Amino acid sequence: MTTKTTTKKTTTKKTARKTTPKKATPKKARAGKPARANTAATGAKAKPKAGTKAKPASNATWAKDAVKPKRLSGLDLAAKVLAEAKEPLQAKAIAERAIAAGWKTNGKTPHATLYAAMIREIAKKGKDSRFVKTDRGLFAAKKGA
């Protein structure tokens, strides 16, 4: 008769080594070029070039006079389109009308972008959203918005 003997394997836990950040070392000089000092490692501030002066601040009042009208986002135009339509529309129809109203987009599927944005707004804002999903794929403007 033979009996099997089993040996119990014991494992030892390895302790995690703490890693220290690498220190910046100066670069070696190439043939014919001196090594540059690393200003970030030494804490030295960069000096301005000789002969240059700081430019005075220009008069910024012209910026107030030439204010560009703020371009409406796709969601803003979608809310406007739905408010004018007064009936539920699909995202594709909303996107087409928004593009006709001046929405500039470079995407190949603006209706999908608009659909996702409207769903995201409904999920995030809930009752305060500008949109209501009335049926599968149909959106309407919330009353009073």
Image (tube, rainbow, N blue to C red):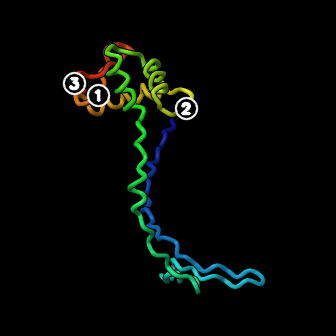
Residue at the spot of label 2: 107
Residue at the spot of label 3: 144
What amino acid type is highlighted by mark number 2? Gly
Q: What is the quadrant of residue 79 in the picture? A: top left
What amino acid type is highlighted by mark number 3? Gly
- Rate crowding at label 2 as few (under 14), some (14 to 19) or many (20 or more) other CA atoms within 10 Å: few
Q: Position of residue 87 (x, y in %)?
A: 33, 13
As displayed, is residue 98 above or below residue 39?
Answer: above
Which label was assigned to residue 10? Answer: none
Residue sitting nearer the eye, 78 or 3: 78
Q: At 25% across and 29% down in the image, what residue appears?
A: 126
Answer yes or no: is residue 93 visible. Answer: yes
Answer yes or no: is residue 112 visible. Answer: no
Secondary structure type for disc 2: loop
Secondary structure type for disc 1: loop
- Mark pair 2, 1: CA separation: 23 Å
Q: Position of residue 110 (x, y in %)?
A: 50, 27
- Mark pair 2, 3: CA separation: 31 Å
Residue at the spot of label 1: 130
Q: Earlier in the sequence, mark 2 or mark 3?
A: 2
Q: Earlier in the sequence, mark 3 or mark 1?
A: 1
Q: What is the quadrant of residue 81 in the picture? A: top left
